[in-house]
Amino acid sequence: MACIVKNFEIDHQKGIKAVRDSMDVLNGKWKISIISSICHYNTRRFSDILNDVVGISNRMLSKELKELEINKVVRRTILDTRPVTVQYELTKHGLTLKTIINNLVEWGVAHRKIIIGK
Amino acid sequence: MACIVKNFEIDHQKGIKAVRDSMDVLNGKWKISIISSICHYNTRRFSDILNDVVGISNRMLSKELKELEINKVVRRTILDTRPVTVQYELTKHGLTLKTIINNLVEWGVAHRKIIIGK
DNA sequence: CCGGATCCCTTGCGATACTG
DNA sequence: CAGTATCGCAAGGGATCCGG
């Protein structure tokens, strides 16, 4: 009985760590918006994302995209056009975030209703 | 046709804003871990959460819980024991985060496998 | 036991300007 | 077009101590 409780607790700790791992990747002011933008269009260019995500600067966009690329959420492709354009798309791994994003959208809407009072 | 495209874009912008609303509530180093802890036990005391969320200081826990209470994610109850103990539980609204948290746990586990290489 | 108050350091992030 | 470099502030968050 104590053993069951103990395993229960261990799993809970694992869960908390796993959530933190996720949040480390998704944290910051812009990440999820960027992912949401790319996800919506399947493939999206730098300047297009810059327009989608209102308020972000090119410096930030560049930095965030680089981190997402390192975390294998996003794939970067340079197209040899003149001038150069760069394309971003979600990796297979990145695509698995779609469910989470949809849930976050739903929750955000519900939350606004509750807080602002409809 | 152009109209359809336009509505499509508008909805996308709404989606991005909704995600941001969610993240504003959930952002920071600790929030989701705290919610995860309370959610797991249904009802949890201050000092217990302090133990669950490894690394957090009482100052931070206090601050984060207060914000979550303001955002109606968490309900706070003072028990008249000696010395005083305080109990936290998720509101109905807070409970709707359960799905998101479970998804984040799954994704975090998958992510670690991909990045660390199993 | 549950916090609040203070101090201080680190980080995130914005603004701006510049390259291939 | 897609970034990089530099600067600088404000927020985030840790450590410690105090009080009901």
Image (cartoon, coloured by chain):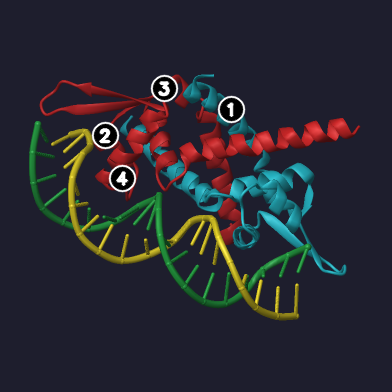
Chain colours: A cyan, B red, C yellow, D green
Q: At which x and y percent is residue B60?
A: 31, 45
Mark yes or no: residue A95 visible.
no
Task: Specify whether disc 1 shares its chain with disc 2.
Answer: no
Say if mark 1 contacts mark 3, CB within 8 Å: no
Give the labeled residue for mark 2. Answer: B46
Q: CA distance from mark 4 to mark 1?
A: 27 Å
Q: CA distance from mark 3 to mark 2?
A: 16 Å
- Residue type (three-letter) at the residue carrying disc 4: Met
What numbered label is drawn on residue B60? Answer: 4
Q: Of label 3 and label 4, which has the lower sequence position? A: 4
Q: At which x and y percent is residue A37?
A: 70, 45
User: Residue at the location (26% across, 45% down)?
Assistant: B59
Viewer-side residue, B115 vs A99:
A99
Q: CA distance from mark 1 to mark 2?
A: 30 Å
Q: Is residue A19 above or below residue C20?
A: above
What numbered label is drawn on residue B91? Answer: 3
Task: Specify whether disc 1 shares its chain with disc 3.
Answer: no
Q: Of label 2 and label 4, which has the lower sequence position? A: 2
Q: CA distance from mark 3 to mark 4?
A: 21 Å
- Residue type (three-letter) at the residue carrying disc 1: Val
- Residue type (three-letter) at the residue carrying disc 2: Phe
Q: At which x and y percent is residue A9?
A: 37, 38
> Dot 3, crowdedness within 10 Å: few (<14), some or many (≥20)?
some
Viewer-side residue, B82 vs D16:
D16
Q: CA distance from mark 2 to mark 4?
A: 12 Å
> Dot 2, crowdedness within 10 Å: few (<14), some or many (≥20)?
some
Q: CA distance from mark 1 to mark 3?
A: 17 Å
